[in-house]
Image (spheres, rainbow, N blue to C red):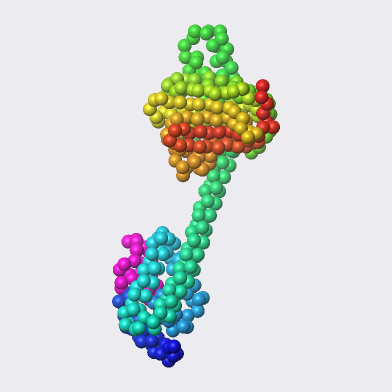
Amino acid sequence: MESSSDQLKTKKVLLQYLEEHQSLFLNEWNETMIVNEIDPYKETIKENGYEMFSLVMNTIKGSLSEEVLRKLAYKIATERLEANINIGDFLYNINLGRNIMVRNTFGANLPIHDTQLFIEAINKHFDTFSYHAVTKYTNLKNDVIDEKDTFISENHKDKLAVLGQISSSFVHEFRNPLTAVMGFNKLLKKENPNLKYLDIIDYELNQLNFRITQFLHTSRADFNEEQREQISVMELIEEIQQLTYASIIDANINVEIVFFPDLYVTASRNGLKQVFLNLFMNSIDALKNKEQPRKLIVHAFTERNELVISISNNGPAIAREITESIFEPFFTTKELGTGIGLYVCKKIIESNDGYMKCVSNGDLTTFSIHFPDSKMMDD
Ligand SMILES: Nc1ncnc2c1ncn2[C@@H]1O[C@H](COP(=O)(O)OP(=O)(O)OP(=O)(O)O)[C@@H](O)[C@H]1O
Ligand SMILES: [Mg+2]
């Protein structure tokens, strides 16, 4: 068995060898590590290397406290996060340091059996450092993400509050004259069925009415005030088809409706109408970005104690990473979109005790509305 005086001798030789070759190790580390050209801590990295080296020396001497190593790990992790380096590159650089130190320990030409203990200590040193550095780095990164999320949701809240204020004061002012004009237009059509352009006027007025109603919905904190009634889903869909008829013909879309039997749901009629109009209009927009054949499919069925109404189209799929965001207010990929359509849909359906889902793949994009079965009645 090796005597402690032998071990002390090995330690001394090793420390001396490492000390003499310090600049060689550090240069190799500096030249081979991954550093961004615009790293704000470029100079500090070298200093950190020196610091790390002297801590490794202390580990070999047996005089390093974990607290000191943890402090350095925290300092470097904070700098690396600010430098925006990714965690993979960060770990790569740490392990590079470990390999250079271990490899050079062999360079001291001491019998392997004598250096084993010190190599284990160096490895443990780097493991402890990695543990503290990665923990700190991850916590800091999570804080940044949380901060961003809070900022985004605060920002949305602010926008919604402003939108709500604008809506509630303007909507009523616009709505009353609009309702009157729509009424008179109908009357005009009845008295003069052959008068040109009345259909176009009617279509545009309906679009305007839809937009105004949409704004009204974003401003309403409580949709529950709306009266609920029993609605035939089939009838409602027919109404929506009439309202979107011009766009459907224009885009040459084949609408397929699969209902068996007709289903009834107790909900706010205006609310549901707004939802289906939004879903139809989104589908039509999506289909415009696709070659023929263009299909819009409406299904209503019961499944596992739920009434499900789904609107599908065979347009381009929604990228997986944005399917979560599309229900957020102001999220839009359209040049002229406001991004409140789906947000309003979700709010309306939830206020009627239902929920919404979106599934999109290469074949179909489907938005489905689910109501608990207490809200439905087969005819
Ligand atoms: N059927 C669909 N197919 C593909 N993408 C869709 C579909 N429906 C919605 N989207 C995506 O979700 C986004 C948000 O839709 P949403 O209806 O909330 O807003 P918008 O249509 O952009 O604007 P608007 O407020 O006028 O409705 C759209 O911009 C689009 O990227
Ligand atoms: Mg929309």
Residue at the image point whose x is 58% and y is 30% from the top: 309
Q: How many marks?
A: 0
Q: Position of residue 183 (x, y in %)?
A: 59, 17
Q: Which residue is more in the foreground, 93 or 274?
A: 93
- The verdict on residue 32 being magenta is yes
Residue at the image point whose x is 43% and y is 65% from the top: 79
**Horizontal placement of 280 versus 40: left or right?**
right
Q: Position of residue 34 (x, y in %)?
A: 34, 63
Residue 286 visible in this rendered orientation of the protein:
no
Q: Quadrant for the N terminus, please.
A: bottom left
Q: Which residue is more in the foreground, 88 or 14?
A: 14
Q: Position of residue 207 (x, y in %)?
A: 52, 25
**Horizontal placement of 192 versus 335: left or right?**
right
Q: Which residue is more in the foreground, 151 or 248?
A: 248
Q: Position of residue 117 (x, y in %)?
A: 43, 80
**Horizontal placement of 365 versus 260: left or right?**
left
Residue at the image point whose x is 59% and y is 23% from the top: 260
The span shown in magenta is 27-50
- The verdict on residue 2 being magenta is no
Prevailing SS of the magenta stretch: helix
In the rendered image, the vertical position of residue 250 relative to residue 28, given as above or below: above
